[in-house]
Amino acid sequence: MIRKDKQPSMRAFFLGPKSENESWVRSEIQSILEEWFQYRQSLFPGDPEVISAKERRSIPFLQRREELSSHLSDLLNRLKGETPKFTPRYIGHMVSETSLPAIFGHFAALLHNPNNTSREVSRVTSELEEEAIAMLASMIGYDPNQAQGHFTSGGTIANFEAIWRARFRMDHWVSLALYLAEECGAHFDLIQASHMGWQRYYQLVKEHDVDEKVTRQYSIVGSNPFRTAARLNKYLDKPYEGPVVLVPGNKHFSWVKGTSVFGLGEDAFWTVPLNANGRVDRSALTEMISRAHSQNRPVMMVVTVAGTTETGEIDRVDRTDEILRDMQNNDGLDIWHHVDAAYGGFLCTMLGGEDENLFAPDCLKALKAIRRANSVTLDPHKLGYVPYSCGAFLTLDAENYRMPEYRAPYLERAHVGPEKWAMTLEGSRSAAGVTATWLSGRALGFNPNGMGRIIAATMHAARDAASYLYAQCNGFQILQPLDSNILCFSIAYEGEPLSSVNQRVEAIFDSFLESESFSISKTTLIPENYGALMQAHMDQTGGAIDCDHMVLLRCVFMNPFWAKEAVSNQLLPELAIELQRYSDVFDGL
Ligand SMILES: *Cc1c(COP(=O)(O)O)cnc(C)c1O
C-alpha cells in the first residue's frame, strides 16, 4: 500500500512524535544555554556581579523563585491542553511539527533578542537576514544577487508589502504624467501613465529635468488624495474611481484586508473567476484587465496564488506571466504581478530533483514561473516548518523593492541601504524567524536533497491517503486536482444533491471534532468564486447543485512523519474506519 520510505535520515531534523530524538535535542539545547552562560560570564570581566550568592540564598529571593516556578508549572500544564500539532494525527490546518534547525535557530536568537529594525540593534542578525533572504530567493528561482526582501510576521504582512510597493510605483508614474500635463501641456492618458514603466519614467524625468519635490504635489499617496483626484478629473470623462487589484477567487482573506487598509476601498478588490481546476481563469483575467482600463481604472497589481489556503491549488502563474508580458510588449503597459506563495513557495524545494515529477506538468510550469514575478510572499511558518511568526516578502530586484520613501532621489536607482526600517511596514522585528530560517537553509537545504525530500514525502502522503480512502470508504470523492499536499474531499453518492452531501460532510466533521483522534479541517466553497470547480466535483457523482455553498473535508498532509511506513500503515486504516463510521452514523446505518 505504502511506497518505500526514502528519507529516514530526514528524521534527524525533527524531535519525533514520541520525542525519539530527545537526548540529542537535550544536548543541543544544553549547548545553546552553555554558550549563552559563558558568553555573559566572559564579557566585561571587570564589571561587578549583580546577584550575589548571599542574595540568591535569602528567604525572600527563594520565595520569589518558588512563586515563579509554580506559575510556570501552571503555564506548562495549561499548554498541555493545546491542540497537539506535532503528531501525524494532526492533519487540520497549515501547521505541524516544527523542525529542529528552526527551533534551535529560533531559540538561540531569542536569548540575544536582536531587533532587525536597524543594524544598530542587530548587527549580526541583519546580515543573517540578507543571507536567509538569498536562500529563499534561490529556492524560488530568483537570482539571489538581485533579489531583495525581508522577513515579516507572516504572509498577511508580506502581501501588504506588495500592495504598498505596487501603489508607490503606480503613484510615482501617475504624478509625473500629471505634472507634465499641467506644466508642459503634455498629453495625459491615465492608463498609459499608470503603467508607463520605470524606463519611460526615468527618460521623462531626464528630458524635462523634473524635481521630485515638485511631482510630490501631484501624488495621491504623498500629497492629498482628494486634491490629486480633482486634478486628474480634468483629463477624464468621468470622475476618477481609483485603481483596482485583481485577485483570484481562491485568494486568502488578507487581500480584502489589504485593499481596505491601504485606502483603496474594498470596491478596488476585483475577484477573478476560477476555472474548473480552481485556478485563475485566463480569459476572465484578460477580460477584467480590459474592463478596468475601459473604465479608466488602472490595474495596480495582478495576484496569483501558488498553493491556495483552501484547497492547495496552484494557479497557472506562467499563464498570468505570459498575459502581462504580452501587454507590456504589445501595448507598453507594465503591470505588477505578485505571487502569493505563502503556502506553496516551499514546494519549489522539489524543483530540479527527481521528485518534481510528483507535480502535474502544468503545476511544474507554474512553480517555475514564480521567478519571473515582481514580488512573492512566502511563509516559512507553514511549509518551512519554522515556528511562528515568520513570513517573508521578496522582490525580483532592487527596483521592485523600492519603498514609499520620498527622501530617495528619483533619479537614483533604488535606495536599498543597509537599514530596513524605512522599507518595512513593521517597525521592530524579531530576528528569531530569520535565524530559524537561516539554520534550516544551512542544515536542511532548501533543495531537492534536503527540504525537498521532506515535502515530496508529504505529497506522497496526500496521494496515498487519497487512494486508500477512495478504496476503503463508500462515496469518497476527491476534489480534483490534487496539486499539492492538501486533500479535500466529500462523501457523496450517485445522484445525491449537494445540500444533502453538505449535511453529511458537516456531521462527519463534527464527529471528528468530538473524537479528537484526528484533527482535520473543513472548508466551504461558494459559487461566486468556485462555480466551475464545484460543478466539476458534483459531476463525479452527477448530483445537482441545489444550494449556495459546498462543504468539503480538508486534510493538510504536511506532517513529516507520514513518510514512515509504520505510521501510515497504522493511521490510514484508522482514519478510514473512523471516516466510514461517522458517515454510516449519519446515514443511519
Ligand atoms: C496563510 C496564507 C496567507 C496569510 O499568511 P499569515 O502568515 O497567516 O499572515 C496568505 N496567503 C496564503 C495563500 C496563505 O496560505
Image (cartoon, helix red, strand yellow):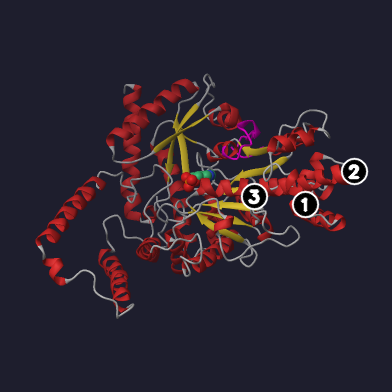
| 196 horizontally vs 450: left or right | right
The type of residue carrying mark 3 is Arg
Q: Is 95 or 153 nearer to us in this picture?
A: 153
Q: Which residue is found at the position 61% from the left and 61% from the top?
A: 148
Question: What numbered label is drawn on residue 61?
Answer: none
Q: Which residue is found at the position 21% from the left and 52% from the top?
A: 72
Does 515 sit above or below residue 41? above
Mark 3 or mark 2, which is nearer to you?
2
Q: How many numbered markers are drawn?
A: 3
Number of residues whose C-alpha sits closer than 10 Å to that of mark 3, classed few (under 14), some (14–19) or many (20 or more): many
* One can see residue 202 in this view: yes
Q: Which residue is found at the position 58% from the left and 64% from the top?
A: 138
Q: Which residue is identified by label 3?
A: 165
Is ligand 1 less than 8 Å from the beta carbon at label 1?
Answer: no
The type of residue carrying mark 2 is Gly
Q: Return the disc, 3 or 1, that comes first in the chain's sequence.
A: 3
**Secondary structure beneath disc 3?**
helix
CA gap between label 1 and label 2 equals 21 Å
The magenta-colored residue range is 261-281
| 24 horizontally vs 161: left or right | left
**Where residue 93 sits in the image (x, y, percent)?**
41, 43
| 300 horizontally vs 381: left or right | right
Q: Return the disc, 1 or 2, that comes first in the chain's sequence.
A: 2
Asked if the magenta segment contains residue 503, the reply would be no
Q: Which residue is identified by label 1?
A: 197
Residue lying furthest top in this view? Answer: 546
**Where residue 88 sits in the image (x, y, percent)?**
34, 49
Quarter occupied by the C terminus: top left
